Image: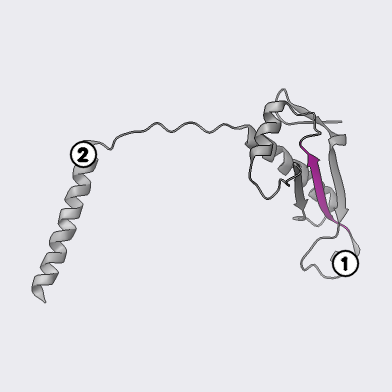
Amino acid sequence: MMLQITKNVWIQDSEIELTAIRAQGSGGQHVNKVSTAIHLRFDIKQSSLPDNFKINLLNIHDYRVTSDGVIVIKAQRYRSQEQNRADAIQRLVRFIKKANIIPKKRKQTKPSKQSIQKRLDSKTKRGKLKKLRQLST
């Protein structure tokens, strides 16, 4: 099967390595017996993603991306393995999509004359208030 990232970008399920592990934290007797957490590993360099996706993903400084270029996601939010597997895959898709979004460049703007005047008036008013306090003591 294939996993859809965007309209034109797909990745093979075989490129995603899913491993069931025991979940951390409290959970009573159930947590010690069953491996419900999912450890997802996705090698960016070996994947079939387009080059621009790979470059963007490798340039992200995120704790989920190792120095070898492998995305590691640990899903243990739910009590069932199937829900955690779906959650891990969904988080991977969101991470890849987020890496491809190019932020808009900020246009430099000047503050309006009215906003400058308003700021200066409030500073003057505050200064006068402090001056009155100083005179009254």
Residue 43 highlighted magenta (yes or no)? yes
Compared across the picture, whether 90 is left or right of 124 comes to right
Above/below status of 79 relative to 48: below
Residue at numbered disc 2: 114
Q: Quadrant of the C terminus?
A: bottom left
Q: Quadrant of residue 61?
A: top right
Residue 46 highlighted magenta (yes or no)? no
Question: Which residue is the extreme one toward the bottom?
Answer: 137
Q: Quadrant of the N terminus?
A: top right
Separation of marks 1 and 2 at Cα, in angstroms: 65 Å
The numbered disc on residue 19 is none
Segment tinted magenta in the rendering: 35-44
Give whichever of discs 1 and 2 has the lower sequence position. Answer: 1
Q: Are marks 1 and 2 in contact (CB under 8 Å)?
A: no
Q: Quadrant of residue 76?
A: bottom right
Kind of residue at badge 1: Asn
Secondary structure beneath label 1: helix
- Total labels: the figure holds 2
Q: Position of residue 54 (x, y in %)?
A: 71, 32
Residue at the (65%, 47%) spot, across then down: 62
Kind of residue at badge 2: Gln
Crowd rating for badge 2 (residues with CA inside 10 Å; few <14, some 14–19, many 20+):
few
Residue at numbered disc 1: 32
Above/below status of 117 relative to 28: above
Residue at the (87%, 52%) spot, across then down: 20
Q: Magenta: predominant secondary structure element?
A: strand
Q: Position of residue 36 (x, y in %)?
A: 85, 56
Question: Which residue is the extreme one toward the right?
Answer: 33
Compared across the picture, whether 10 is left or right of 121 comes to right
Residue at the (21%, 37%) spot, across then down: 113
Question: Which residue is the extreme one toward the front?
Answer: 67
